[in-house]
Structures are given as C-alpha cells and as structure tokens.
Amino acid sequence: MENGEIFTSHFRFRESAEAGVVKRISSFCSAESLPHRLDFLDQELSVYGYPSIQTDEKLNQVALVNVTYDLLQTYRRALESHSDTADGLRNSESDAARFQHLLSLAREDVATKDRELKTKRIEEAHLNQRIETLRKKLKSEQEKCRRLSSEMQSRDTQFKHEKKKKSQEVERMQTKLHQLLQDKKHERLLGIEILNSLQRSDGKRGKWTTDKTKKNNEQEMYQLILANYEDSQKELLNENTAMRKYLKQMQDELVCALNEKTTQRDVKQRESRRLSLDKIDIKSSASVSSEESEASDSVLDGMFEMPYDIVKDDIEKSLKSKWRALRRLYQHKNLHHLTEEDKGKAENKSEKITEYEKVIQEQQDLIDYFTAGQGEKSSSFPSDAYFLEEKSDLDQQKSIFYQQRLAFENERKVYTEALLQLGQDQQNFEEEKSRWLQHHFLQLTPFRGSSSKKKWSSPNKSFRDKSLSLSWNEGLKNHSAHDVSPSLRNARGQADGMGTSGGSSGAQPLLTRSPNKTSPNRTPETPHNPWNGASPPIPSTCELYRALGLRYKSSDKENNSSTSSFKVKSCLKKSPTNQSHASPDGQSELFSPRDSGHTLLLRHNRLKMDDIKTALFQS
Amino acid sequence: MNFSELFKQSQFHCKFSPDGQYVVTCVSYKVIVRSVDTLQILRLYTCLDAVQNIEWSSDSAFLLCAMYKRGICQVWSVEHPDWTCKIDEGSAGLTHAQWSPDGRHVLTTASFNLRITVWSLVNKSISYIRYVKNSKDCLSFTDNGKYLALAESRKCRDCVSIFEVESWQLLKLFETDTEDLSGLKWSPDGRVICVWDHCLWYKLLIYTMDGRCLTTYKAYDWALGVKRVTWSPTSQFLAVGSYDQKVRILNHITWKSISEFSHISNIQSTNAVVYSESETKPSLPRTENTLIASPPIFSTQSKYEFLSPPIQIPSVQPDPEKPNPKIGVGWLEFSPDNKFLATIDDSMKTAVHIWSMLKLSLYVVLLQASPIKCARWDPHTSRLALCTGNDKLYLWSPSGSVSVQVPISATFHVHSLKWHPSAESLLLMSKDQMCICYLEKKERDKEIDN
C-alpha cells in the first residue's frame, strides 16, 4: 500500500516535472518578446564565445542553427564526459568499496594475527618459564654432581693416601723383620732398668691378682655402671621434678590470671545482667568461667606428682582449655583495645588509600590516553576516508533534498493559488448559500436569519484570517528551520544508521525508519478528521503544514483532541518548544528518525495534498 | 703483666707440672726443672739422646722422657735426682710413651702398633696389650684414672676393650659398628665412650662401658667426615667438627644434634661481635718502648677493631688432589665453665669462632692478621689465649679482647703457649726459646677492660 503510494507519487512527480519544463520553455519567449530575448540570447552566447546570431538586428537563422548544433554537440559531449566521469566515479567508488572491504579483511587478518601473536607469546612465556625451571633444576643437579664428584675425588685421594701409608708400613715392617732375622746374635738387653722400685702412689702394697680380685673388678665395673645409671636417673628425676614444679606453677599462675579476669567479668556480668545489655558477652564469659572452673577442678595439686602417662590426658586437656580461654580473652581485649588512636591510623590509611587510588586512576587515564592516541594515529587514514565518503553521501542527499524542496515549493505555490481560488469559490458558495438560506428563511421566518448568520460567520472569518497569517509566519519559520537543518540532521540520521545498519547508503535508513507509528496511522486521519467533524472548512496554511508533516506533535495532539482551530493555533505556538524538549522523552526515539525520513514524508504529504485538492474540488 | 727472661728450649718440650710448682724444659738431651715462682734451676737431668717427648707424672714427682729414635724412655724423679730408670723397647721400636694416670706405670707403644707394653715402676712387671689400632687417639683413660678404653683391631674387626688400670685386667671387650675406627674418648664423667669412624665415613657412636651402643650419629654420607671430637667439661655436650666446616653439638640425654655451627667465610649475622686485628708499622719507636732494654724496632703495632657485618674472612680452598685437605674444623675446645666453644676452621686459619653455648649461636669472631698457631682456654674461666707466630700474645674474655706485645725481644715469636694450672701465668714458646708471662690479677682485669 505504502510502496504503491510512493511509486505513484514518484510518477506524478516526473510528469509534473515535464510539464514544468514545457512551461519553462514556453515561458521564456513569446512572439512579442522575441527581439528582446534574441538580444539576450545573443549576449549570452557571446559570453560563451559564439558569434552573434543576429545580423543587422535580424535573426541569422543559419548562425542560430549552427550555434544550436554546436551547443547540442558540446552538450552531448559534456553529457558523454559526464557519463564517463560518472562511470569513473562509480568505478572508483566500487574500487573504494573493494578497498574498504580489503581493508576490513586486512584488519581482521591483523587482529587474528595479533591474537595468534599473543597466544604465541603466552606459549613462549610458558616455555620460557619451563626452560627456566629446567635450567634451575639442571643447575642444581650440576651443583650436586659437582659436589658429589668433588666428594668422590677427596675420598679417592684419601683412599690412595691410606693405601700408600699402609704399603709403606708393610715395607718398613718387612725391612725390620729382615733386620731382626739377621741380627739375631747380639740381642739388645730388653726391658726395664730401674734403680729401685717405687712405692705405689697411694702408698698401699700391691695385691696378688686372683680370680677373686678379677671378679671383684668386674663387679666393681658393673657397680660403677649401675651407679652411673643411678646418677643419671637421679639427674633426670631432678629435672623431672623441676619440670613438674614449673608445670604446676604455670598452671597455678594461669588459673590465677584467668580467675582475676573472671572475677572482673563476673562483676561486669552482674551489671550487664542488671542492665540486660550485652547478651553475647554474658554467654561467652559464662562459658569461659564454666570452663575455667571445670579446668581448675579437674587438675588437683597432687596430679602433678602422679605418673605422667596416667594424668597426661587430663593435664593436656586442662592446659588446652586454659590456653583457649586465655587466647579468647586476649582476642577480646585486642578487639576492645582498638582505641581511637588506631581508628585515627585507620582513617589515615584509608585517606592514603584513596589518594593512591586517585594516582592510580590518573596513571590509568594517562596510559589509556597514550595507547588510545597511538590507536587513533594508526587508524587515522581509514576514519578520514569514512568521513569523506559520508560527506559525499551527504552532499548527494542534500542536493536531492534541495531538488525535492524546490519541487515542493512549486507545488505549494500551485496549491496556494488553488486554495485562494477555492476560498473565492467557497465565498461565492457561501454567499449563494446565505442568499439561498435568506431566501428560504424569508419564506419561513423573516426575523432570525440575517443576525444569526452574521454572528456565526463574522468571528469565524476574522479568526480564520488571523490564524492564517499567524500560521503562515510560523510555517515560514519552521520551514527556514528545516531548510538549514536537513544536512546536519541527515548526517546525524546517517550516523545513527551507521550504528545500526552498518553504513549503508542514505536511502535505506529512510525506508526502514519511515514506518513510525504516527505517520501511517495519521496520514489517512489528518485529512478525514476535520472533514468528519463538520462541513469541510477551508484548510488553513497551518493545517497544510501540519499535513505536510512538518509538525508532528502538534498535529497529533490536535487530532487526538479534535478541538477547535484555536487550540490548534496554541499548539502550533507551543510546538517549537515541544520539539526542542522532545528529545529526553521516550518519544524522541520515534520522532528523531522523522528527520531522516523527511523526503518520504514529503511524498506522503503530496499525496495528502492531492487528496485534499480533489476533495475540495469535489466539494 | 710481667714477663720472665728468655730460656732456651727445643721442640716446644716445656711443661708446667700438674701441681703447678715446676716447669720443665728440654734443650736437646738436657732436661731442666725450674721452680715456677723463682725460675731457679732445681734439677738438671742428662738423657741418653735428644728428648722427643716429655711428660709429667700425675703426682708431679716423675718425668718421662721419650727418645723414639733410640727406642728408649728415661724416667726421672724430681725428689730423688739420683734415682734412675731406663726402659728399652729393644728391637720392637718405640713410637709413643705415656704415663698411666696413677703415675707408676709407663705405657710404650711399639712400632707398627705391634703392642702396648705396660711397665710397672712398682714391681717391674710387664704387661702387653696387643691388636692396638693406634696409640694416640685410640687410647683413653677415664678422668678418675680407673679405666682404660682401647680401640683394637681383631680379625679385621674394630673392637673396644676396657681395662681396669690398677690390675690391667681386661674387663670388657666389645665390637663396634665401624668401618675403620679412628678414635675414641671417654666422657669426662666416665659414663660413656664416644667412638668415631675414619674420616671417609661420617659415623659417631656412643657406647657405655659394658658395650651397649646408645646411639649412632651420621650427619651425611660420602663426603669426608669427622675431623675432631671434643667433650664439654660437664659431659653434657659433644662437639663434632667435620670436614664440611661445621660443628655439630650432640646432647647427653637423647644424643641428638641440637645445633649446627657453620663456619662460613661470609659473616652476615649481626649478633656476633667481630674483632679484627689491624697492624700498623710505627714510623718512630715510641717513648714507652725506649724505656725497655731491647726496643722492638722491627715489630708492628696492632690493635683490635670492631667490624660490622657483612665480613669476609679470608679463606683458602684446599687442593683436591692432596689427602687430608686443609678444610673443616680441626680444632675445637670448650671453655672450662662450659659457656663457650672456640673453634678454628683449617681453611680459615686467621679466625677463631667463639660460640655461645647458652644461646647456641656465634658470639665472637677474632680475626687475626696472620694464621693462628695455638689457642688455649684458661683452665678456670672463659679466657682464651692465642698466638699467631709474632711477638704478641692475644687474650680474649667476654668483657673484651686485647693484644699484648712481648717486650723482651722483637725476635721472640710466640708459636705455642700453655697455661699454668692456676691460670696465673702463661708459658710462651718460640721455636727455640721460652718465657713465662705472669698475669697479675688486677692488672689482668685492667688489661681486659681496656
């Protein structure tokens, strides 16, 4: 349906263009203004370096034909060259597209290569690490080997040395033996030469060595051994008792310390119970105190004198429980003693941390900046290329838009003329109607007719004039705003389109974005709604503009409310602000594509206008 | 601090008697006994040959002089200079001679460790002990002198035999789990015997007298192992110095390592105090020196300076081709009050590490300008005396460190030193001379405080 409309509109546009050309050609010269126009033409041609087509104030037809022919020729050539250049342009465009594609491919390639490089690097790092560990291992092994070999060497030399020593000893022994065997005759007097025997150092006489004394000696030895063992046992016993004493002392002191704490705690407890404040504290202290009482009960003084293997478990248990209690107390104390000083320190620390975080952030930013800067540098060329392409696209679209606007301007002129005529016709019709009504009324009731008619008609007319002028001005303003904006808005629209549809040509987003909810729904309504309400009024220019889709919101509101034209006017007044404020709303999404879909709307509007025209003319 | 005049001596054979009354010096074949207080010659003995070892009996009444080349020993009595005694090992040869703890028996070791002969000076009786491994490290008496532990090698197996010294009766013989036992040592309280393997195998075993093995300790495999072992005076710690430049401390209850003291040439620890000796050559002899008869013109001035870590201790890497490499802890000794352990690593001969046994950490490092020749603890307190082969004596105590110039002669270079049992004097020896340094109590304190 919509597409059909578009095609028909297009067709009509072309038709009207041809008609415009014919009109333009015919409007240039007429029979009366021929000499004038000829002069003008002559001048114009002379500007282009053609010889005069007039000879003696008369038209030189041959020259004219020649000039015309030459003009045609040059025009054809120009066209040809134009088409050539267009071809060239297309070629270059396609080339550019190809290169773009290649570039993207290359980029992808680079990315994959980068990735590969990264993985390879990681692998390399892994391998390096492994190599390092292996090297370390090797080093340690080498060290070990070296150490072992040096040990072996030293052992070896030592062994050799020992062997040498032994062999020397053997040799010496052999020679000695040989000597002894030879010198058997004059044997030296062996033994001891002593003047007189000495007394024993203890002054006692020597004893005969008998079996008994031998046994006694052995017994003595064993007795000594036993005595030694007894001595060592005594030593150990002493040590043991000392240890036991220390253990007991330690236990007592622990109990003492814990009891002190618990008595303090008990006082606290009572207080806290009275105040019923800290329940957890009560619980913990209660458990501690119960444990302590248990512990102190379980280990009596005599226990430390018992054989250790019997009481070992008990002592260990009680000690452990005491340690636990003590540790808990300590921790508790530590927690409580997180004084203000500590807090101050903590604050200092946190301040410092925030400071450092800031510094880190700055550094990060700097790093980002530098890395990003490099990135930009590397991609400066392609981005620039994009920009150029966009620019050319924009220019194209702009030119199209201007053409369309021109066409629209022409149409508007035609339409206003038709409208004026229509107004006249309607006035005539009104007059006729009033006359007919007067006539009819005079036939029925001669009093009421004229006054009531005047009441109804006069304010309406004045109001309509006002609104017309106002809306005309508004429309102009709006129009001018539109005139300036399209290039920018189009660009923006395309930029949006790039984001979503990936840089396709300007026409595509127009098509895709055109079906905003409002336009198709409204298009049939806008012309019909006012008609349904009352007898067909003269469409004011404001309505025209509305119909042209230059004012969406206002028209929407108007349509929904379907109120009098006064309201419409107020809406129109407000609309520029509304439009400017629309962007933060969710609706802005709906409205913003309208800019890009401008040309399409124009077509729609042309359709609507045609409808209006036909309707009006019918009426 | 006073110094005696110089006396001749040979081969560092100078010794204080155990009771502290006498000092004996050997000059070749002459043996001279002097009174420590007056330095007057009390006795003069003439031996058959140049003395190669001299030893006091435990009661300070007799002197044992060994002449290994001749294979004979001579015993002299301080009280009765006319009394003579000569022990001839004969053709078996002599490699070692020592007193038994009772001072009435002499133990001589025949060449090739063929046997140990026990000569009784009481009844001329002779006992032989065979299968001895070696007589230096493999022979140990208990501190009370009642028992002797001896490492033997019977049928290519290492064993330890326990003798009752009074009757020389073999009380116990037990095998040890070692490849090549190279040393044993009674604990000072006489309860256990520590046995260690040859340096090719790091292995240390603790045995009771009746042969029960209490523990086997092995710090690592393969590399060269134990170099030296020392008991603490209270028998509570056993310090094991090894070729990996570490000292491991074993405790006496569980016999487990409680600490490892590494001797690294680069000291990073900030807890340890490092004294460094700095030498300066004086341009002119100072006025103090001119007062003394023989001013040490050629000597250098030296003083200790504190160094702050990190400190690089000069170290020499040993030649791997040579046996018994000069690396690892070759000397270690506990202070008599059991508070400190002094160690010297053979690759860092210029430094003494002193470790605190209370904190089990490095306490002091004495960094000398030249290699340390000898270091000895004061027998009563934590005081260490050391010499580096120059004309100075160095003393360290927890309150400070001091270097003292021996003012007698610039050519007297201290190579060895010995403490008097009362710790009131020191015997200083150069290669061929000796002198006694008297430490007066007050003066000593002053010196140390400086």
Image (tube, rainbow, N blue to C red):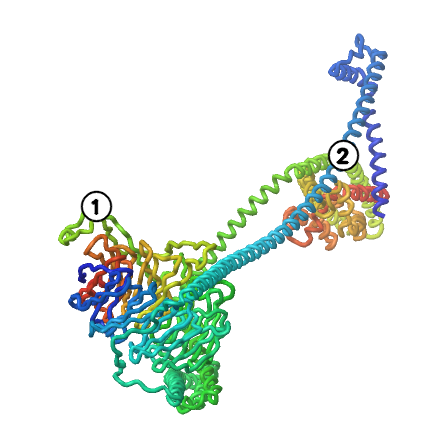
> B336 or B92, which lies in front?
B92
Same chain check for tags 1 and 2: no
Element type at mark 1: loop
Label 2 crowding class (10 Å Cα cut-off): few <14, some 14-19, many 20+?
A: few
Query: Hey, which residue is sitting farthest left in the picture?
Result: B291
A591 with respect to B95 (left or right): right
Callout 2, which amino acid? Asp
Query: Hey, which residue is sitting farthest front in the picture?
Result: A185
Q: Which mark is residue B283?
A: 1
Q: Nearer the viewer, mark 1 or mark 2?
A: 1
Residue B159 seen in the current view: yes
In the rendered image of this protein, does residue B116 appear above or below residue A371?
below
The chain carrying label 1 is B
Q: Which mark is residue A451?
A: none
In percent of width and height, residue A394 lies at 71, 37
In percent of width and height, residue A365 lies at 54, 48
Callout 1, which amino acid? Ser
> A213 or B267, which lies in front?
A213
Residue on which disc 2 sits = A95
Element type at mark 2: helix
Label 1 crowding class (10 Å Cα cut-off): few <14, some 14-19, many 20+?
A: few
Quadrant of the image for the C terminus of chain A?
top right
A14 with respect to A502 (left or right): right
In percent of width and height, residue A231 lies at 37, 85
Q: CA distance from mark 1 to mark 2?
A: 98 Å
Image-quadrant location for residue B26 = bottom left
In percent of width and height, residue A529 lies at 79, 51
